[in-house]
Image (cartoon, rainbow, N blue to C red):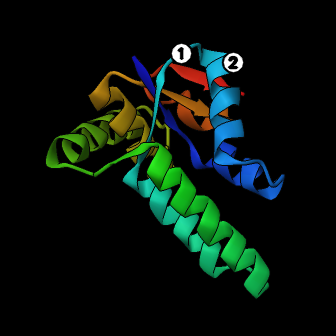
Amino acid sequence: MGVILDSSILIAGERRRDSVSEILERVESACGKTVSALSAVTAVELTHGIYRAKSDADRERRQAFCEELYQAVAVHPLTLEIARLAGRIHGEQMGRGIGIDFPDLIIGATALHLSFGVVTLNVKHFQAIPGLSVTQI
C-alpha cells in the first residue's frame, strides 16, 4: 500500500524549511515503510503557492522545493477512472448533505483508485470520503 500526500503537509513542511526527505521521513514514521505519491491536483496547489510568493527569494525557494518533490515521488494524473470515481463519491455524499472541497475530492479519489491512503494535517477534509484511510501527521 502507499499514501497520497496532501498539500497541507507539504506546505507546512516547506514553510518550516523542511527538506523533502525530512517530510518523507515524517510520513514513514507515521505510516511505516510505504510508497509516497501525489495527486496532480497537489501540483496545481503547490504551483499556485509559487506564484503567490511575496518575494523573489520565497518564489525561488518554493520552486526548488517543488522540483525536489517531483523528483522524489510520483505524480498521478487525473484520469477518466479517477474523475468518474470522484463524481460518484461527490454525488453520493452531496445526496446525504455532505460537501467535499474539489481538491480534497480529487486527492481522495486518486488515493482510493490506487488503493492508497491519504496523509494530511486536515483529517476532517477527507473523513467524508467513504473507505478512505486517512492518517494525520
What amino acid type is highlighted by mark number 2? Ser
Exactly how many numbered labels are in the figure?
Answer: 2
The CA span between labels 1 and 2 is 8 Å
Residue 57 locus on image (x, y percent):
77, 80
Q: Which image quadrant: the C terminus?
A: top right
Residue under label 2, please give it. Answer: 29
Residue 92 can be seen, yes or no: yes
Q: Which image quadrant: the N terminus?
A: top left
- Compared to residue 109, the image places residue 18 above or below, namely below
For label 1, count other residues whose C-alpha is less than 10 Å away and answer few (under 14), some (14-19) or many (20+): few
Residue 95 can be seen, yes or no: no
Residue 24 locus on image (x, y percent):
62, 34
**92 or 49: nearer the eye?**
49
What amino acid type is highlighted by mark number 1? Lys
Residue 37 locus on image (x, y percent):
44, 38
- Compared to residue 65, the image places residue 123 above or below, namely above
**For this view, does 50 lie left or right of residue 57?**
left
Kindly identify the residue that appears in the image at 38 percent across and 32 percent down: 111
Residue 98 locus on image (x, y percent):
49, 37
Label at residue 79: none
Label 2: state its secondary structure: helix
**106 or 88: nearer the eye?**
106
Residue under label 1, please give it. Answer: 33
- Compared to residue 78, the image places residue 96 above or below, namely above
* Callout 1 touching callout 2 (CB < 8 Å): no
Kindly identify the residue that appears in the image at 52 percent across and 62 percent down: 67
Identify the residue at the far right of this view.
16
Kindly identify the residue that appears in the image at 67 percent across and 29 percent down: 25
Snapshot quadrant of residue 87 = top left
Label 1: state its secondary structure: loop
Identify the residue at the far left of this view.
80
